[in-house]
Image (cartoon, rainbow, N blue to C red):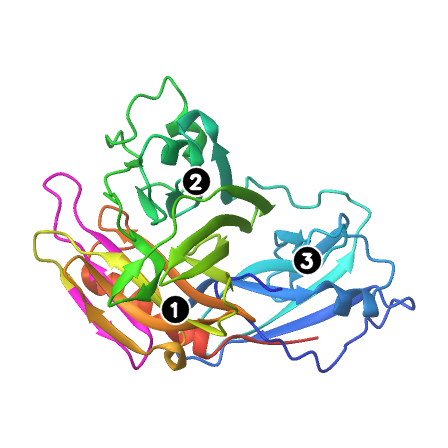
Amino acid sequence: MLGRKRLYIFLFTALFFSQCKSNHDRLLITAANDLNIERKSETIELRWQHIIAKIPTLNPGSIELTEQASGAKLISQTIDYDQDGSVDALLFQADFAPKAVKTFVLQATKEAALVETASKTYAKFVPTRFDDFAWENDRIAFRMYGPALQAKGEINSGVDVWVKSVPNLVLDKWYAPDYGSYHEDKGEGLDHYKVGPSRGCGGLAIWADEKMIPSKNFIEWKIIANGPIRTVFELTYAPWEVAGDKISEIKRITLDAGQNLNRFESTFKSAQNRETLPIAIGIVKRDKPGDVSMDTKNGVLRYWQPAHEKHGHTGCGVVIAPAKVNDMKELSDHFVVSTEAKTASSLTYYAGAGWSKNADFPTLAAWDNYLAQFSAGLASPLRVEF
């Protein structure tokens, strides 16, 4: 399984061997941006089986990745998606100018940690805060709620947002007992996004009887990868009653460095063995007027919340493949994307947030531009070749 902000289907076509290595321990990787837009922090994901087919002796802990033109050494990450003890994929990131083509050199090295860096993504289970599960990257942070909070009577499977104005990872600091309240901005950001029983920023529910019927809080969690480039984890939800059926869900969430949108992959089971389930992906609507855009053609639902008296605007966005959109509509308390999930596979969409006090999104136009480019990138992934 490839869990990434934009699922790349790679075409591995031509192999270029080093002229000075007889044991084929060097590969050239070419990536092309076909769009006339700049693409920052693009994650390039290579299947490990394809790599070791060309460099059989390659050790996951001894990899050197270099941008050929500049000679810059790049950070990489290996991931075991199915947790069977074997590497499934190798990741690295690069920025691309409009229509740019870049070449990267991958080879073995005897240096165990050729490029050391602080992780830009992070997730943690927080039992000291009633079983929160929180995650972040260098741009934004989120959390969802667990069984201890449900035991207190707070039932919520929506997505909470923690806005940030710094690239630092803040979860450990903000959750520390001596930090004080993370509902106050101390120069890094804060939690002022109110979720309550809503879907928050991109949570989903089953649509039945003309209303959303969500699960309760997650009951289990599992971290699959935790930086430096990508964090992946799963949350499991107990079966809940929907129109005489029992529905259960496993939600896999992926967040990459440099991005504001998570990749959500939800896999459902139906006690009645239903093949499809009607789904509503929601953004909670505030009491005061905000600015909403429903772009069914490009699969983008966007809400720019009304300004907070102290903390500016928070923008939320949902991006989904246009072919999966049945409708977008406004309810009394949410804006929603209507779609459906097949129980034999997973439903994939992207959702996240931006903050007007972060330099990346000072205006609604900047948030709209980001979502539009993200949607375009999904439709036209990088072309990557060996």
Q: Amino acid at mark 1?
A: Phe
Foreground residue among 204 and 19: 204
The residue located at (57%, 46%) in the rendering is 228
Q: Would residue 169 be visible to someone looking at this image?
A: no
Magenta-tinted stretch:
292-315
Q: Give the residue at the far top of this rendering.
A: 178
Q: Is residue 331 left or right of residue 111?
A: left
In the rendered structure, are the residues bearing label 1 and label 3 in contact, judged by CB atoms less than 8 Å apart? no
Q: Is residue 205 left or right of residue 356?
A: right
**Mark 3, residue position:** 65
Q: Is residue 121 left or right of residue 326?
A: right
**Mark 2, residue position:** 134
Q: Residues within 10 Å of mark 2 (few under 14, many from 20)?
A: many
Per the image, is 343 magenta? no
How much space separates mark 2 and mark 3, taking CA atoms? 31 Å
Quadrant including the C terminus: bottom right
Per the image, is 296 magenta? yes
Which mark is first along the chain, 1 or 2? 2
Where 119 sits versus 100, above or below?
above
Q: Secondary structure at mark 2?
A: strand
Which numbered marker is on residue 374?
1
